[in-house]
Amino acid sequence: MNWFSQDAYFSQLERWLSMEAEAERQRLAQRRQLSQSGNAERGGETIVGLFLTDHRSGLAGRLLLDFAKGGSDRLPMNRLKVGSPVVLSNHDNLADDGISGVVSRRTPTMIQVAVDQWHEADRYRIDLSPDETTRQRQLEAMDITQTLTGKAGRLRDVLLGFEEPRFVSQSEVAFRSDLNPPQQDAVRFAMSARDVAILHGPPGTGKTTTLAEIIVQEVEAGGRVLACAPSNTAVDNLLERLVTRLPKVVRVGHPARVFESLRGHTLDELVESDSSAAIVRDIWKDVDQLMRAAKKESGSWEGKRARGEMYAEAGRLRKEAKSLERSTLHHIVDSANVICTTTTIDEDLLGMQMFDLVVIDEACQCTEPAVWQAMLRAERIVLAGDHCQLPPTVVSKEAAQEGFSRSLMERLIERFGSEIYRRLVVQYRMHESIMRFSSDHFYDGELIADPSVSSHRLVDLPRVHSSLLTEPVIEFWDTAGTGWEEELERDGQSKLNRKEARWIVEQVEDLLDDGVAAEQIAVIAPYAAQVRYLRNRLQIPDLEIDTVDGFQGREKEAVLITFVRSNPEGEIGFLADTRRTNVALTRARRSLRVIGDSATLTRDPFYRQMLDYFELHDAYHSVWELGDV
Ligand SMILES: Nc1ncnc2c1ncn2[C@@H]1O[C@H](COP(=O)(O)OP(=O)(O)OP(=O)(O)O)[C@@H](O)[C@H]1O
């Protein structure tokens, strides 16, 4: 969609935000109506029947509660990620409205929630909750953006597509890391942008490495940088590459949501280790003592007066401690060269601080309202991402259809074309033949496999034997004509395919027999029901089985994909969004084995080309060859 005016643009975003809020509220209400049985868990936004297994005080005075299903049972597949806002309630009492919390840690068998308070119950349930705070902040940022004038107003207008982005010629750059020529070109390009530049990073091409170099260059030139991403994991990936290279990098955000190894860089821990922290702790001790002494005073008039004085003194000291804490906090933020945060920015903390450069990694995972909080603080902007992979998750189908799931980055590329972006093309993940189809289809055939990966195979890994599974790099196994049909999961919406699942189980067992470690294998299914079905049948520690969404941004040595869809009508549902398949195919480093029904899939031209590709590379097989169909 193109807008004719700023008003039209922002009103559209506000409308989509309220459609999304309504859709999320309805979804939560529906889920909470569902029985306490496993049905409620199917959408991945609820976990029921949980027992409290541990509790302790966490950072910033919050309570950390650990929940598990009992025994060593794995938790059902879910979208409750670290940082997700949730409602914690009594499993056995549907009338319980619950309390708000945030997921602070998760393992396959445990989920930890950080809360301010907690009601005791025998069993609990956790529901993903609509994130009203974030939405409110986005609306406020959009309101302010509309009033901007001068330089900031111009930047807004470039982002809306009303003004052309400007670039200046860039003098020689002294690179601080080993970058390949397209990465160097991207750094130069970003540094030459006066308004906005885009870094297009196809899978495994070192997008985050390149962004880190751009940030280092900016800081060395005397600039301050705000480095953001939509998820905590993506922020931490960037932070990890910065802390070894720059001294004053601060991670803003609840420490519980930050990788453990990086927590020393969070604002909370930096405040805690500042020399003023000891003084603050002493003041708090004095406050405690005064409060205790006040309680002991007698009820006489004199006692009452003394008590009043003690309370007043405690109040004064409390104010002093808080103000000291606050000034330490602001001092650390103000003297940082780089602030790393999610795109949901803490306004109280950053105030209206401006940054010479704002970068947003994984920008294609952000809806448009999600970027304006960061944009407001920018002199210049660099967006990085890949619009050929999954778009942001949007709950409201209607809003998504109208365009809400299209990111600002994608829109700018459509609006300005190649003048606004540079694409990284050397990739460090996939064997040449795993990469080629995706490259031709999504990246104009420009991807190049670095020699360190271009011909690597499973059999080259230590302890892996040569076999029919470890020698070939790509294979497609066709189920057409066998009747290996999909089915709808009982009581559910999602689809599974038992026969394809059986094939996957055999493949995994054979790979393990050939010496491939479970943690080197990924099983990917586009449908949650197939993931659930396979997880039940393949309970192997360290083996990851997940949906495509769960694997975005990750890689494994060997990837097995089950496409699931097989029906006489040739319906392929959301497989028609080929970006999903692009993500699935490009997770594999050395081996990609795929099973699907060509008769169903090839009704779509994309899948016809994919099958042609496998055939051309002598990698097409029919499951009839297996003999036991
Ligand atoms: N110039 C380079 N030389 C050698 N290795 C590199 C280079 N650039 C990146 N890499 C390696 O490639 C891998 C991917 O890099 P990085 O994580 O920066 O990529 P990305 O594009 O952000 O990844 P994703 O696909 O998850 O978005 C890393 O192991 C990194 O060390």
Image (spheres, rainbow, N blue to C red):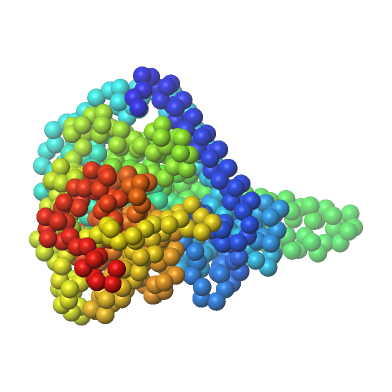
Give the x, y percent position of residue 225.
Answer: 32, 44
Q: Quadrant of residue 487?
A: bottom left
Give the x, y percent position of residue 478.
Answer: 25, 59
Give the x, y percent position of residue 552.
Answer: 33, 54
Name which residue lies at 39% across and 22% down. Answer: 6
**In what quadrant does ligand 1 lie?**
bottom left
281 vs 148, nearest the viewer: 148
Left or right, 413 with respect to 19, comes to left
In which quadrant of the rendered image does the C terminus lie?
bottom left
Residue reaching furthest to the right: 300
Name which residue lies at 17% across and 76% down. Answer: 467
* 48 vs 446: above or below: below
Name which residue lies at 46% across and 67% down. Answer: 107
Res. 74 visible in picture: yes
Res. 177 visible in picture: no
Left or right, 116 with respect to 249, comes to right
Q: Quadrant of residue 444?
A: top left
* 4 vs 59: above or below: above
Left or right, 444 with respect to 215, comes to left
Give the x, y percent position of residue 460.
Answer: 15, 73
Left or right, 627 with respect to 308, comes to left
172 vs 307, nearest the viewer: 172
In which quadrant of the rendered image does the N terminus lie?
top left
